[in-house]
């Protein structure tokens, strides 16, 4: 293997440490404790795991965690009423509604009901617009984590060719905006892209956010490129025993690591950075709400 491994787990620990330092200062100097409210509707097992992990890490950095677990059949009116209460609660600086929502609830309507200043997921249409126009926004956590790792690895990204595979609102599109903001030349690829292999081969930076296990092989990667693998896919792992599974990314790690200059592993790459950025966004929202200097 030639690639340097970008250790998202270790990087996320340093981000959480910084967040904890800011939280301690907010408490000591201003008597303010940042608070994050997480709303979970229904019993999707993966969402339950994420919400538990978010709550635990929120408390570990010294912030208040408010968990609201609602029944799967909760009406839109009741959910909107809860969001309205949280919007008006001065102890709540960040609000996150765990997606996906049950089918009878309109996700766009619910997300856009969150006060944009408390929208720590950065999915509110106002934050999308602010990011797209290069203004101060709440930035979606997963792409923000990817950008932080890229900046940490490269310093400046200016002039680099970046290819983002995937055009979702939560990862692909905001990732492309962030890379553009850092003066990369950005290509967004998707399921209709012609000759994806050739497109990827041009890239100094590849961000894969597709949701297809090991779809990007090493021979698509330009030698020395930096590969950020956002995908989280569970596949069968017969080598671990009957019925066992393991997590893999959208990139074929083993072959890509032979060619890339640097690569994020799955697990232990982008995943841990996402929650760390959620905590950082909550501190940012808290500082903005109180007119205090924001952490860098
Ligand atoms: P979506 O399903 O919303 O989007 C997937 C994108 O991939 C779409 O734009 C789709 O194109 C594109 N795509 C699908 N098939 C192909 C193909 N064969 N070639 C090229 N592009 C293709 O997924 P998300 O953006 O929500 O998530 C992507 C992955 O990232 C998932 O594995 C998810 O689990 C993971 N993830 C990880 C997070 C983390 O914290 N690490 C957080 C969020 C997501 P089209 O638009 O044309 O359909």
Image: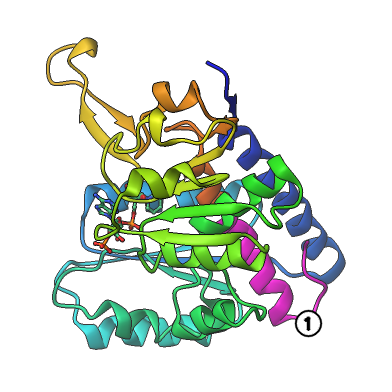
Q: Which one is nearer the viewer's eye here, 260 or 167?
A: 260
> Taking the image as drawn, is residue 140 in sight?
no
Q: Residue visible at 31% across and 59% down?
A: 190
- Asked if 235 appears above or below 24 in the picture, the reply is above
The total number of labels drawn is 1
Estimate the x, y position of residue 149 in percent, counting from the top left. 63, 45
Name the quadrant containing residue 284.
bottom right
Toward the viewer: 267 or 279?
A: 267
x then y, percent, for residue 269: 51, 37
- Look at the image and tell me whether residue 68 can be seen: yes
Front-most of 161 and 176? Answer: 161
Q: Which residue is mark 1?
A: 291
Classify the position of ligand 1 by quadrant: top left, top right, bottom left or bottom right.
bottom left
Q: Which residues are magenta?
A: 277-296
Q: Is 101 placed left or right of 202 in the picture?
A: left
Farthest right residue? Answer: 29
* Residue 13 forms part of the magenta stretch: no
Q: How is the image coloured?
A: rainbow
Query: Is residue 94 depicted above or below 155 in this figure?
Result: below
Residue shown at 27%/37% (left/top)? 213
Where is 43 relative to 229, above or below? Answer: below
| Residue 290 falls within the magenta-colored stretch | yes
Residue 25 in the image: x percent, y percent? 82, 59
Secondary structure mostly seen in magenta is helix
Q: Identify which residue is drawn at 68% across, 47% down.
A: 15
x and y percentages locating residue 35 in the rendered image: 59, 67
In the displayed structure, does residue 282 sit left or right of residue 22?
left
Question: Quarter holding the C terminus?
Answer: bottom right
| Secondary structure at numbered mark 1 | loop
* Mark 1 beta carbon near ligand 1 (under 8 Å): no
């Amino acid at each position: 293997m030639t690639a340097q491994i970008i250790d998202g787990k270790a990087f996320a620990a340093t981000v959480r440490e910084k967040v904890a330092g800011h939280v301690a200062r907010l408490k000591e100097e201003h008597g303010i404790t940042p608070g994050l409210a997480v709303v979970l509707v229904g019993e999707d097992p993966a969402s339950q795991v994420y919400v538990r992990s978010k709550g635990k890490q929120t408390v570990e950095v010294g912030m208040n965690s408010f968990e609201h677990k609602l029944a799967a059949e909760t009406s839109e009116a009741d959910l909107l009423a809860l969001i309205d209460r949280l919007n008006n609660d001065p102890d709540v600086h960040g609000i996150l509604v765990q997606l996906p929502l049950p089918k009878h609830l309109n996700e766009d309507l619910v997300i856009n009901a969150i006060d944009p200043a408390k929208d720590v997921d950065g999915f509110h249409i106002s934050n999308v617009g602010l990011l797209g126009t290069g203004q101060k926004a709440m930035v979606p956590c997963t792409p923000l984590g990817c950008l932080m790792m890229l900046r940490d690895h490269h310093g400046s990204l200016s002039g680099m060719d970046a290819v983002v595979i995937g055009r979702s609102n939560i990862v692909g599109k905001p990732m492309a905006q962030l890379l553009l903001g850092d003066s990369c030349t950005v290509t967004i690829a998707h399921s209709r892209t012609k000759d994806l292999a050739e497109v990827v081969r041009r890239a100094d930076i590849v961000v894969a956010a597709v949701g297809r296990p090991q779809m990007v092989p090493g021979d698509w990667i330009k030698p020395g490129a930096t590969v950020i693998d956002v995908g989280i896919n569970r596949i069968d792992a017969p080598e671990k025993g009957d019925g066992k599974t393991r997590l893999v990314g959208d990139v074929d790690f083993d072959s890509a690591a032979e060619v890339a200059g640097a690569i994020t592993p799955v697990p232990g790459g982008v995943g841990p950075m996402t929650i760390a950025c959620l905590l950082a966004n909550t501190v940012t929202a808290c500082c903005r709400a109180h007119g205090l200097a924001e952490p860098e």
